[in-house]
Amino acid sequence: MKTTGAADVPPLTRHVATFVVATQDSDIPAEVGQLGKKAILDALGVALPGAISAPGRVLAGYLRDLGCTGPAGVLGTSLRLAPRFAALANGTAMHADDYDDTLQAETGRYQGVHPTAPVLSAVLAAGEARGASGRELLLAYQVGVEVACRLFDATHVNHILHGFHATATCGMLGAAAAVARLYGMDADGVATTLGIAASQAGGLQENFGTSVKPFHAGRSAEVGIVAADLQQRGFTASPIILEARRGFFQALGGGYDAARLVDKLGRPWSFVDRGIWLKAFPTGSLGHPAMTKMQELVLRHDIHPGDVARIRVKTSQNIHHTLLHHQPKTELQAKFSLEFCLAALLLERKCGLNQFHDEYVMRPDVQETIAKVEYTTYTPDEAVREQHTIVTSHVEIELKDGRRHGGRIDAGKGNKAHPMSEDEVADKFRECAEFSRWPMDKAERAIALVRRLEDVADIRDITRELTAAGD
C-alpha cells in the first residue's frame, strides 16, 4: 500500500487532471457508451420517487424557502433553482431510495461507491444552465464516473473501515471532475477544482439508514459545481491535493495504492471492468445477492409464508456490519436490513418501492417474519478457502415439514455477471414513474430521448419531460 510523503510520490492529481482534459468521445468504446446511457436512464428514473421521499421533500421545501431560483430543474417537481441547489436536490433524490447504481469493491476490500448519482446530478444541473448537448453531458458524465470509481479503488481500506462513505468523498471528486470537463477547463483548472472539492469531502457511514446518507450524494453533486464555479472566478487550491502528505488520500485513509489509479483511468473503463451494478431492489446493494437467491427459491419452489419455520442467511462480516439494522422499525432502517428484505420477499415475492414505508415495516406479519431470519457470518479465512466474492451469500429456507431449500450465490441481479437489460431498465424507469404518479407520456418521451442521448441537441429537452410546469 503506497503512502504519501515519500520522495517518489507520483503526481496523482496531475494524472487525473490530464485524463479529464484529454479524453474525447472517440476514446469511449461503444459498449461503455451504451452502458453509460443505461445507467443515466436508471438514475433519472429513481430520482422521481426520490423526489417524493421524506428526504427529498424536506430538502426541496428547504431550498424553496431559500428563494434561490435559477435555470436548473429539480426532477419530479416544478422547482427551478440555481444549478448548485438543483444538483443538491437531484443527487439526494437519486440516492434517497438506495435504488441507484453501485461500483462494488473488489474481493478483500470493502463496500463500494455510488458513482452516477453525484456525477450525473452535477453535470445535469450545470449542463441545463448552459444548454449543453446530450453528447457533451455524456462525455462529462463518463469522465466523472471513471474518476470517482478509480479514486475509490485507490483509497486505503481504512477510508471505509474508519467510517467514511465513498459516495461523499470519491463521488464528490468525480462530480468535480465531470463539471470541470463540461466547462472545458485545462489541466491546471481541473487540478484546482479537485483541490477545492477535496477540502469539502466527508460523509460518515454512521448515518446509513437516515436522511443524511442520500444527502451525501446530493452534497457531492453540489460541491462539484461550487468547486468548478469558484475555480472559474479565480479561487486557488493545492495542485497536488490527492497525493500530498496532508491531502485527500492521507487525511481520509492514511495512504493509497497508486497502481490502482495510475494508468488505470479508462484502461479499461470501470463500466466494463468490474462493471457498475444497476439495482433490481431499492436497498443497499450488499444484500442483493441474498435477495436474488431468496426470490429465486420462493418462486421456484412455490414457498408460502405459512410453510416456513426458519430462514437462514450467511454473508461476510462486512455485509453484516453495513446492513446494520437487524430489527428495523422504519423505512430507512429497513433499507439497511437484510432480515427485512428477505421477509418482504417471502411475504410479497418482491421487494420494491411499495414495501418501503414505515407502516409496512411495522406490520405484525412483517415483524414476525423478520424474527424467523437467522443471520450469521463467515470468517475471512472461510471466504478465501471457498473463493468467495465480496458479496457471496448463502440462503436456506427451512419449511415446517423439515424440507430445506437453499444455495450459494456470488452476484445479485444487476451485476455484470447477471445484468439488467435495456428493456428491464426502461421497465424500472416506468415503475418509478408510476409509483411517483408521473405522467407516463412524459416518462416514455424521456426514455426515448436518453436512448439516443448523443443525438440530443439540448439536454433541456430531457429535463422538460422530468419536471413539472411552474406554479
Image (cartoon, rainbow, N blue to C red):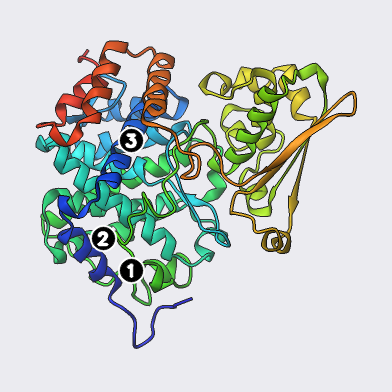
- The image's mark for residue 194 is 2
- The image's mark for residue 203 is none
Q: How far across and down, in percent of the image, does residue 332 sit? A: 56, 32
Kindly check if marks 2 and 3 are in contact, taking CB atoms under 8 A apart as contact: no
Judging by the rendered image, the residue that carries numbered circle 3 is 38
Farthest bottom residue in view: 7
Disc with the residue nearer the chain's start (2 vs 3)? 3
Q: Nearer the viewer, residue 428 or 165?
A: 428
Q: Where 112 falls versus 350 (above or below)?
A: below
At a point 35% along the width and 42% down the height, the residue shown is 116
Relative to residue 178, is residue 415 drawn left or right?
A: right
Kindly check if marks 1 and 2 are in contact, taking CB atoms under 8 A apart as contact: yes
Give the residue type that dot 3 points to: Lys
Q: Nearer the viewer, residue 454 or 29?
A: 29
Q: Where 34 falls versus 22 (above or below)?
A: above
Give the residue type that dot 2 points to: Leu
| Helix, strand or loop status at disc 1 | loop
Camera-side mark, 2 or 3:
3
Q: Residues within 10 Å of mark 2 (few under 14, many from 20)?
A: many
| Helix, strand or loop status at disc 2 | helix
Observer able to see residue 296 = yes
Judging by the rendered image, the residue that carries numbered circle 1 is 242
At a point 37% along the width and 53% down the height, the residue shown is 270
Q: How far across and down, in percent of the image, does residue 372 sit? A: 80, 30
Quarter holding the C terminus is top left
Disc with the residue nearer the chain's start (3 vs 1)? 3
At a point 34% along the width and 27% down the height, the residue shown is 60
Q: How far across and down, in percent of the image, does residue 466 sit? A: 26, 22
Farthest right residue in view: 401
What separation in Å lies between label 2 and label 3 (alpha carbons)?
Answer: 27 Å
